[in-house]
Amino acid sequence: MVNEYNDPGCRRLATLNVAGFLAKSEVNGPGTRAVLWVQGCNRRCDGCFNAAFQPFSPAEIISVTDLAARILAIPGIDGVTFSGGEPFAQAGPLAALAEQIRARGLSVVTYSGYTLVELAAGMDPSWPALLAATDLLIAGPYIAARARPDPLRGSSNQQVIPIGTRLLPSQRPRSFGTTAEFTVARDGTITTSGFPPETVLAALMPRHGRA
């Protein structure tokens, strides 16, 4: 898929359309990670946790250079996680960002609503670059009927695929109970990250924002 944020011009402009950012998280991949949620997704999975991130509308437009500097200035992180939205809808600039992050010894985890077969088929010319810059891929659409308690997957059909070699054996995917984080903003808005039980989400409404 090609859009204004994912084409050769976007690599020249080197900008990303960002829906959300969290400096440190313990539930979005192995270790302590910065998390970047991109804006825009055409997969439109029923029951999507981040439905507000689906429209291809401008959110925070930020340069790859500025975003890399923001991430690299965070002390004590093991890497960055790309989520959304659909990261492969902005694969070109995300690949450029990932290359800068990995050059500093950090790992990259990427979530996608596409399957590995779809991504490997390279329906978009910028997809191989992001795949090559990814150390751990969580691939596949969210299927509500197959929802499961898992630290990395929303539903059991999704694949957790190590690609790179930067993750230590102790950081490789493992199975344990549902894990979630809750962040309270100054205005009182509660942002949830991870995969908490639906009963918890219901209790947090209407001030809840899912990331």
Image: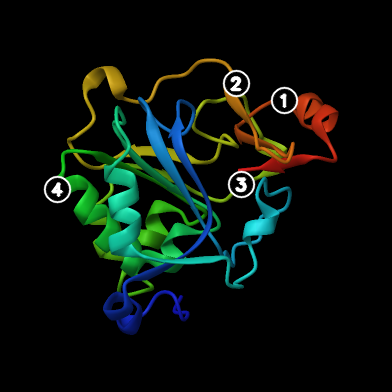
Residue 47 against residue 165 in the figure, above or below: below
| Mark with earlier residue (1, 2) | 2
Q: Which residue is mark 4?
A: 103
**Toward the viewer: 120 or 173?**
173
Check disc 4: other Cα within 10 Å, few if <14, some if 14-19, many if 20+. few
| Mark with earlier residue (2, 4) | 4
**Snapshot quadrant of residue 30:** top left
Quadrant location of the C terminus? Answer: top right
Amino acid type of the residue tagged 2 in the rendering: Thr
Q: Tell me whether circle 1 and circle 2 mark residues in contact (CB < 8 Å).
A: yes
Q: Tell me whether circle 2 and circle 4 mark residues in contact (CB < 8 Å).
A: no
Q: Residue at the far front: name it.
A: 186
Q: Which residue is mark 2?
A: 178
Q: Position of residue 175 (x, y in %)?
A: 47, 19
Determine the CA span between mark 3 and mark 2: 16 Å
Which residue shows up at 21% across the image and 41% down it?
Answer: 164
Determine the CA span between mark 4 and mark 3: 31 Å
Task: Point out which mark residue 197 bears.
Answer: 1
Q: Which residue is mark 3?
A: 142
Task: Point out which mark residue 168 bears.
Answer: none
| Mark with earlier residue (3, 2) | 3
Residue 100 against residue 195 in the figure, above or below: below
Query: Which mark is nearer the camera, 4 or 3?
Result: 4
Determine the CA span between mark 4 and mark 1: 37 Å
| Mark with earlier residue (4, 3) | 4
